[in-house]
Image (cartoon, helix red, strand yellow):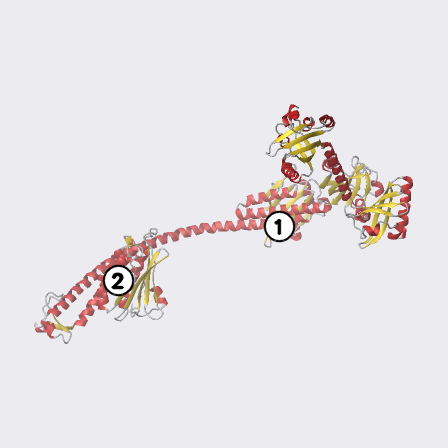
Amino acid sequence: MDEIVKSPYKVENITLLETIAANLPGMIFQILQRQDGSVFIPYISSGCKYLYELEPEAVQPDFQVLCKLIYPQDIKAFTESIAVCRTTLTPWHWESQIVTPSGKLKWIQGTLQPELQAAGDFLWHGLVMDITDRKQAQEKLQESEARYKAILDAIPDLMFRISRDGEYLDLKSEGANITLSREEIVGKNLQELLPSDVAAISQVAIAKTLDSGILQTCEYQLPTSLGIRDYEARLVVSGTDEVLAIVRDITDRKQGEVALQNLAQKFAKAFSCSPDSITISTLQEGRFIEVNDSFVNLSGYGRDEAIGKTSFELNLWVNDRDRLNLVQELQSTGVARNLEIDFRQKSGEIITTLLSAEVIDLNGIPAILAVHHDITERKQVEAQLRFCAQRDRLLAETLVRIRSSLKLEEILQTTVTEVRQFLQADRVFIGLNNANLGVKTLAESVDPQYPSVSGWSTNDEAYLQELRNLLKDNRVRVVEDVTQISASPKVKAHCQKFQTKASLAVPIMLGDELFGALIANQCSGPRHWQPIEIDLLQQMSEQLAIAIQQSQICQKLAELNTNLEHQVQERTAQLQQKMQEVENLHRVKDVVLHTVAHDLRTSVMGNLMVLKNLLNQGVESKGAREQGSRGEITASLSPVLPIPSAPLPLSHAQSSIPISRSIIERMIQGNDRQLTMINSLLEINSCEKQGIEIKLEPLQLSTLLGECSPQLEPMLTQNQATLKNLVPADLPLVMADGTRLQKVLVNLIAHSLHNNPPGLNFTLSATVEGGMIRTQIQDDGVIMSKVECDRLFDLHVRDPQDCCSTSIGLKMYLCRKVIKAHGGEIGVMSNRKRGLTFWFTLPLATSSATNRP
C-alpha cells in the first residue's frame, strides 16, 4: 500500500473500491502503461487470491504472471484483442479459461476501460469476474437442450398441438412422411384436413384426453400416395384446452400382425398336414399336449389316446435312456438335430426315426416341439446294401483265392467257413458226388454244439441216387422247415440224425455233370432263406466249380510239365552237342581262313613283285623304248621268273613274248584289289572276334585333314580330281584316333574315285552340332538309290557286275566299325542333282568318354 500512496496517480474512493471488491467473486485492478513501455500497477484487489490463487503482492511486480495462466489456445486471441483496445481506446470485453497454479480450470470474464492521461500514459481500469458456475450452467443447459432436441429429432413421428375445438396450433414434421407444408396445416381445423370419419374420431379422443387427463389412443386409416396407410395417434394434455398428438405410421406393424396370423395358420396347416410325425409335449414329464395325424399313423395311437398321456405311459421308448439324453441336450443347447432313436408302435413293432426337437414356451411352460422322420425302410435298405456289400466282398475274396492259390482243399475250407459266418448258419459243407466213392464231404464248418457230417457215408445206392436227383432236378433245393416237406424216410432219418431243421443246397456243376453240392443247414430251428442268401450260394457254387476245374487242369498241367521237362532235357543235350559241333566248325573256318588268306596273300604278293619287276624292266629295256610306239613289252623268260624247271624246246629268240603294257598294269591292279580284299577280310575277322582297338586323344580336325594330303594327292592326281577344303581352323578339338580316322577319309574318297570317271570334284566341310562335329565329303559324281545308300556300309557280298567292287564294300564296313568305335555315326545320302555326300560325326574333346565295342 505504500507504493499505492507514493503513486503519482492517486486512486480516489479507494475504501469504496475495496468494499466493492470484497463482495465480488472477482478482482478489481488498475494498470498504468507509461510512454516508455514500462507497466505499473497502482491497485489490485484481494480478489486476486480467490480468482488466480496468487497474492496481490506477487502480481504487482509483474502483471504477466496472470497472462501466463490463460488457457494456451486463447493466448493469441487475448493478445490481439488487447492490441485492438489500445489502438482504438474502446472498452475491452473478454471471456477465456485459465488454469490456476493448483490445476483448476476456471472461466473468467474481463473488462477494461482505457483512459489516456495528460502525460501520454495509458491508465486501464479493469474488472475480472469468475463466471465458471455460469458457464457450467450454460453448458448443462445446452447439453440438456441438445439432448432433448436429439430425442425429439430422433422420433420419426408427427407431433401436433391441437386445441379442444380441433384447431392445429403447431406441429413437428421433421423425419416424417408428410406432403403438406407447415403453413398449410397450422391454423386449420381437423374437419378441413381429415376425412369426416377420421376427424370425428380425433375430436372424441381430444375431448376424452382433456376431460380425463389420461393418455388416449386411437387408430385410423388415411389414403396416401403410397396407398391406404394405418396410423395410431397418442394424445396427452399439453396445456389449457390443448393436447399433444403423436401420430405414428403403423402400416408395417399391421401388416406384420396380418403376416403373423397367416404364419400361425400356415403353421397349423403344416403341423396337421406334415408327412412327418410332430408332437408337442411338456419338457419335464413328456406329457403330450398336441399331436398331428402323422403321429397317429406312425404310432398307432389315436389323438384321444395320446393327448394327456406321457410317452412312458404309452410305452413308446424302446430305451428309456434315450428320453433322458434328449432332455439333457435340450436343457443345455435348446435344440437337438437328427437323433437316431428306436420307438415302439402300439402293435409292438419297432421302428427307427430321426428325431429333431426344440424347446418352446407355451404360456410360461417349457415344452418340446419334436419332429419324427421314419427311416425304418431306409435302415432296412442300408442293411440290405451292407449285406450285398459283404456278399460281394466274400465273392471277390473267393475269386482272388481261386486265382492266386492252387490248393483246392484250402480254398474249399476257407469258403465254407466264411459262408457260415456270413449266413450265421449252424452248418455249411461241400459234398462230393462220386459214382465209385458215393457221397463224401470235402470241407465243413459247423457249430461245435451240433454233429458233424464229415465222417458220414453210406453204401445205399438208392438213397444216394435220391440225393443226387433232389439236386440235379431242382437245381436249388430250399427247405425252410424239414417237417413240412414230403421226403423218404431215409431223408427224414438223416435230417433227424444231424439235427437239421432247415436246409439250403446248391449244386456244383462241371458242365452237365453234377460234381457235388454246397449246403447250408440251420439246426437251431426252421429258417426263412432270403433271396440274397440263395443268390450268394449260387454264385459261390459257380466260383467253386471254377476252382475245381482249375485244380483238375493244374493236375493235368503237372503231368504234362513232367513230360515236358524230360523232353527239354533231351533237347538241351542235343542242342549242346550241336553247339559243340558249330564251335568246332568255327575253329576250322578260322584255320581255313587264315591258312588260305595267308597262302593267297603270299601268292598275290609274289605275282605283284614279278609283274612290277617285269614292268620296270620293260620300261628300261631298249626293246621297250624302240617299241614304245606300239605300247608293247617283250617279256623274256629268264630263270628269275617262276617257270617250269624242264628244258624248253625253244630257242632263246623264241623265249621273248611281246605283252601289252596295259595288260601288265591291269594284272597289277587286279592283284592289288585281291591283296586289299584279303587284308580287309583278315581285318574284319579280327574286328569281329576282338573288336577295334582305338587310341583316343584330342585332335584338331583341320590338322588331321592336312596330314591326309600325302595319301590323297597321288589318288587325286591319277584320277584328275580336285579337293576343296572348307573345314574351319577354329573348330573345337575332337576325341579321335588319328591313324584310323585318316584311313576312313581315304576310303570314303577312294570309293567315289573308283565308281566315277576322272575329273571328280570333292568339297570337304565340318560343323558343330549338339556336342558333336559333323564332317561332310561331297562329290559331283554319280548318284545312288536310297536302298543302295542304306546298304553301303553293311557287310554283304555284292553282285559281281556291280560297279562297286567287293574290296571297297569291305572297306565301307570297316569305316562304320571305326566311327562307331569313336562313339559317332556315319552315313551317305544322294544329292538332288548329282553326286553323293558322305558324313560322319565325332564327339568333342569336352564330351564324356565314348563307348568302345
Quarter-of-image position of residue 638: bottom left
* Residue 426 vs residue 67, the one in the foreground: 67
Seen at 59% across and 54% down, the residue is 511
Residue 457 seen in this snapshot? no
Q: Label 1 belongs to which residue?
A: 539
Seen at 65% across and 31% down, the residue is 31
Quarter-of-image position of residue 454: top right
Q: Amino acid at mark 2?
A: Val
Gap between marks 1 and 2, in whole Å?
80 Å
Residue 689, image x, y percentages: 29, 54
Q: Label 2 belongs to which residue?
A: 746
State the quadrant of the N terminus: top right
Seen at 91% across and 43% down, the residue is 208
Q: Is the residue 679 above or below the residue 275 in the image?
A: below
Seen at 73% across and 39% down, the residue is 335
Q: Amino acid at mark 1?
A: Gln
For the residues bearing labels 1 and 2, Cβ distance under 8 angstroms? no
Q: Nearer the viewer, mark 1 or mark 2?
A: 2
Q: Is the residue 291 above or below the residue 179 in the image?
A: above
Q: For label 1, count other residues whose C-alpha is less than 10 Å away and answer few (under 14), some (14-19) or many (20+).
A: some
Q: Secondary structure at mark 2?
A: helix
Residue 793, image x, y percentages: 32, 62
* Residue 311 vs residue 204, the one in the foreground: 204
Residue 136, image x, y percentages: 73, 34
Quarter-of-image position of residue 56: top right
Residue 386, image x, y percentages: 65, 45
Q: Secondary structure at mark 1?
A: helix
